[in-house]
Image (cartoon, rainbow, N blue to C red):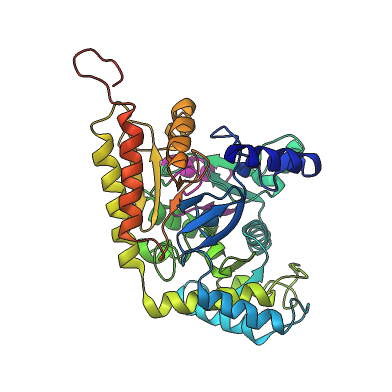
């Protein structure tokens, strides 16, 4: 009966919504089964329409660093909505949010708020092309920068749109150098996730980001950091603070909206001043700087700044990931865990180095079994083998213990007898 409720809801959704979902990964296509429908969230837990609760490591794809329904964020939202949901005009809170972001991220001298990470990236690339008077963009395999046509390879995107997009393997400076040499004087931007969060959690090798900075400087290329996932996630600032590399432009989203839709791009004043109304590069949006998103974001960043929870978040994540590795060591299923700060990802691989091909070639059967095995025991991971998982300030040591116990219970079903090889 419990599972039937989700099936009924999904069947009804498919009658009216394309694919039954408003974002493809929600369909559980990667992990199989029927998606769960969420009714509410509180702290580190989500509650489904069929009455079940789950420890949530998805956190709206990394957005909710304070957990669900944080009282101060909810309070800020209630206060803001009492004053009106949208004005299509400037508000004082927009400037306050801009100030706190610029103070935290020194590479950003000017900023522009938009409505999503996709908009932020699309606008930053347009700006880079105008600033350099060049067209081509270098991106990296396995990274996702939103669904602008020239950053996707799927039906409906004309080849003409993709001709100026060049792709290199993540962590491979040599191929980037080759692309720059081959397309000399026509590369406007290099866009990179400083931590690749959309093929699991793949960290930059030593010297990779620094190498991109040197290439960009040498060839007058705009270096763009897509920190939609990592901005204010790894520290109060971003991955660029952790790795000590300053990009020319930075794209933000997720955490800076406190749970509501938002995006932002910012960087060097000389580049940002090319935006209308100061310059000729046009960008606009009715809901850009929406007062609800801005006030929820302000509340979130003020809490993060005052409490500085990053050390505790990192320690909790380390405890969880070390526990996963220790438990899986005695199982026939070998789990590789990548982590940085409060981000982590689980791979079914014996390799120490995880790259795009490793992530892409995971055993999908194992992935499905693993995801649903933990889901049955009240642990909700990101429903994809290509996405990161996250912790929030609401997670506790008890949540970690319950998660590891759930994993141990699942893996016991897959421990093989060392003598016969049979599953115990």
Q: Quadrant of the C terminus?
A: top left
Which quadrant of the rendered structure holds the N terminus?
top right
Q: Is residue 6 above or below residue 416?
A: below
Nearer the observer, 267 or 28: 28
Q: Is residue 182 visible?
A: no
Outermost residue toward the left?
419
Question: Is residue 324 among what the camera can see?
Answer: yes
At 54% from the left and 68% from the top, the residue drawn is 69
Position of 288 relative to 211 (above/below):
below
Find residue 109 and report its horizontal and vertical position in percent.
54, 77
Residue at 56 percent across and 69 percent down: it is 258
Q: Nearer the viewer, residue 169 or 394?
A: 394
Quarter assignment of residue 332: top left
Residue located 56% across and 50% down the image: 51
Q: Position of residue 233 (x, y in %)?
A: 44, 63
- Report the side of 261 relative to 84 (left or right): left
Whether 181 is among the magenta residues is yes
Furthest residue to the top?
420
Q: Position of residue 61 (x, y in %)?
A: 53, 54
* Horizontal and vertical percent position of residue 269: 58, 76
Q: Which residues are magenta?
A: 174-200
155 part of magenta stretch: no
Please tell me in which quadrant of the rendered image residue 26 appears: top right
Residue closest to the eye, 46 or 392: 46
Relative placement, left or right, of 178 versus 257 is left
In the depicted view, which residue is nearer to us: 315 or 359?
315
Residue found at the far bottom of this picture:
92
Q: Residue furthest right?
A: 16
């Amino acid at each position: 009966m419990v599972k039937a409720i989700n099936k009924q809801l999904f069947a009804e959704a498919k009658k009216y919504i394309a694919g039954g979902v408003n974002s493809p990964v929600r369909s559980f296509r990667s992990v199989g089964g029927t998606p769960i429908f969420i009714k509410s969230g509180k702290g580190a837990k989500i509650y489904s329409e069929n009455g079940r609760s789950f420890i949530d490591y998805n956190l709206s794809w990394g957005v909710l660093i304070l957990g669900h329904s944080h009282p101060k964020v909810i309070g800020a939202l209630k206060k803001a909505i009492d004053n009106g949901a949208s004005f299509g005009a400037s508000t004082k809170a927009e400037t306050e949010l801009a100030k706190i972001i610029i103070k935290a991220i020194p590479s950003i001298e000017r900023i522009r708020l938009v409505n999503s990470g996709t908009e932020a990236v699309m606008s930053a690339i347009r700006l880079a092309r105008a600033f350099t008077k060049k067209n081509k963009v270098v991106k990296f395999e396995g990274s996702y920068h939103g669904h602008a046509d020239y950053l996707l390879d799927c039906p409906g995107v004309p080849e003409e749109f993709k001709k100026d997009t060049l792709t290199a393997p993540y962590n491979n400076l040599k191929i980037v150098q080759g692309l720059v040499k081959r397309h000399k004087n026509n590369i406007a931007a290099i866009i990179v996730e400083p931590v690749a969060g959309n093929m699991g959690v793949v960290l930059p090798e030593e010297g990779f980001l620094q190498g991109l900075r040197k290439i960009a400087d040498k060839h007058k290329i705009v270096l763009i950091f897509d920190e939609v996932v990592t901005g204010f996630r790894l520290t109060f600032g971003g991955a660029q603070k952790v790795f000590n590399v300053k990009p020319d432009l930075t794209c933000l989203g997720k955490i800076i909206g406190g749970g509501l839709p938002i995006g932002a791009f910012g960087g060097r004043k000389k580049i940002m001043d090319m935006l209308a109304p100061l310059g000729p590069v046009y960008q606009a949006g009715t809901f850009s700087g929406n007062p609800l998103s801005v006030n929820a974001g302000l509340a979130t960043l003020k809490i993060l700044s005052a409490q500085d929870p990053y050390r505790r978040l990192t320690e909790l994540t380390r405890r969880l990931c070390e526990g996963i590795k220790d438990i899986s060591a005695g199982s026939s299923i070998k789990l590789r865990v990548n982590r940085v700060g409060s981000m982590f990802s689980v791979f079914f691989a014996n390799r120490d180095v995880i790259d795009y091909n490793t992530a892409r070639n995971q055993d999908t059967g194992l992935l499905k079994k693993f995801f649903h095995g933990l889901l049955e025991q009240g642990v909700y991971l990101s429903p994809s083998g290509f996405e990161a998982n996250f912790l929030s300030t609401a997670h506790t040591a008890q949540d970690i213990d319950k998660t590891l116990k759930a994993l141990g219970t699942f893996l016991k079903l897959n421990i093989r007898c060392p003598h016969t090889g049979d599953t115990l």
